[in-house]
Amino acid sequence: MKTYLITGGAGFIGSNFIHYLMQKYGDEVLVINVDKLTYAGNLSNLENIQDRNNYFFIRADINDRKALELVFNKYKPDIVINFAAESHVDRSINYPRIFTYTNISGTQVLLDYALKYSVSKYVQISTDEVYGSLGEQGFFTEKSLLKPSSPYSASKASADLMVEAYYKTYGLPVNITRCSNNYGPFQSPEKLIPLVIEHALNNKPVPVYGNGMNIRDWIFVKDHCRAVDYIANQAKAGEIYNIGANCEMENIRLIRLIIDLLKELLPYDDKRRIMINYDLITFVEDRKGHDFRYAVDSRKIRDDLGWRPEVSFEEGIRLTIEWYLRNQKWLRNAKKRITNWRKRGGI
Ligand SMILES: NC(=O)c1ccc[n+]([C@@H]2O[C@H](COP(=O)([O-])OP(=O)(O)OC[C@H]3O[C@@H](n4cnc5c(N)ncnc54)[C@H](O)[C@@H]3O)[C@@H](O)[C@H]2O)c1
């Protein structure tokens, strides 16, 4: 039985990954989830998992050495996957300090314990944003220079360098993944897709940065989870992998598509249907340092490990909107968590 230590497992991608592990491996894995439960961590994402005998949750900060010592000593994980992070670019512009604390310092502390307890693989979940911005042409490859723009992407790039240093200096078996923008169930409504859904359902203006022509490259979260599983279990130590599904889209086009789909998928007698239209779209001042375009070349993981995305954007976005419509209580609660966190002075 393999033991996985998942950090940030109560967040969007981490919780999807735990669901993925349980569906794929069942009782053949032991999953330890370490999460600080910031506003972005939500244990209700794991409701149907928490009573399993092969799952344990520990509330802890990845900077907390005492807590990590106890966890590593007790469970002796084979594989550590670090999803824990401050993940929202806008928050990083307002409060960069928490990003260096969690994303850089926290990663380094985790690396210390991965080394001390001789894990067989440490996987750092990074992002394509470490490469900065593209113009109209070209793609990020694993050899592209690191040119982060925001405090968020700078903190992720710094963590990547620390992970590489632990590989080169101490021989810790690591991999780094750099994935494009994820979408799917359990994503916090501070991020674009659930934000548009939440605003449109509540007849609130849907904010769009600048002229809406910035381009993001989208991947369904389950395809990302499958890629992380391939990398954790099959990749050679020291390798970096981009992960992407070749799905570039202007933000404004995506927002219009979500509005169209919401109208189509809401029950015919739902009164909100008439209110949901393009008039909700409101252009706002552009984000500072806004990257124009991301586009990921993921040939390396396809060639080396045989991974391919399985969910088309058309299918994935429909599944996602249907999920949020079925889980409007979850969406309301996630929104409340953000509001309450701010009221309590959380940054
Ligand atoms: N969302 C995307 O599109 C995307 C794309 C590429 C890479 N990533 C990366 O994937 C990872 C997960 O992203 P996400 O979108 O699920 O983020 P998220 O914000 O939804 O979840 C982050 C989780 O980390 C936890 N956390 C935060 N600080 C912590 C700390 N100090 N100690 C322990 N736990 C802490 C939070 O409670 C939360 O559960 C991040 O590292 C992010 O950089 C995200």
Image (cartoon, rainbow, N blue to C red):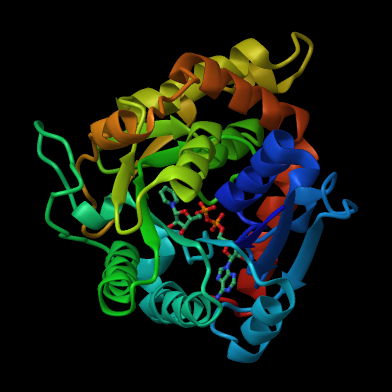
| Residue 204 is at least partly visible in this image | no
- Residue at point 79%, 11% (across, down): 269
Q: Is residue 53 left or right of residue 289?
A: right
Q: Is residue 244 left or right of residue 327?
A: left
- Number of numbered discs present? 0
Q: Nearer the viewer, residue 52 or 43?
A: 52
Q: Is residue 270 above or below residue 74?
A: above
Residue 11, image x and y in percent? 62, 55
Q: Is residue 38 above or below residue 221?
A: below
Q: Quadrant of residue 6?
A: bottom right
Q: Nearer the viewer, residue 231 or 181?
A: 231
Q: Quadrant of residue 125?
A: bottom left
Q: Is residue 152 left or right of residue 145?
A: right
Q: Residue furthest bottom?
A: 66
| Residue 332 is at least partly visible in this image | yes
- Residue at point 69%, 28% (across, down): 323
- Residue at point 13%, 49% (across, down): 144
Residue 34, image x and y in percent? 66, 68
Q: Quadrant of residue 158?
A: bottom left
- Residue at point 21%, 58% (across, down): 289
Residue 30, image x and y in percent? 74, 56
Residue 75, image x and y in percent? 72, 71
Q: Is residue 210 above or below residue 279?
A: below
Q: Nearer the viewer, residue 65 or 46?
A: 65
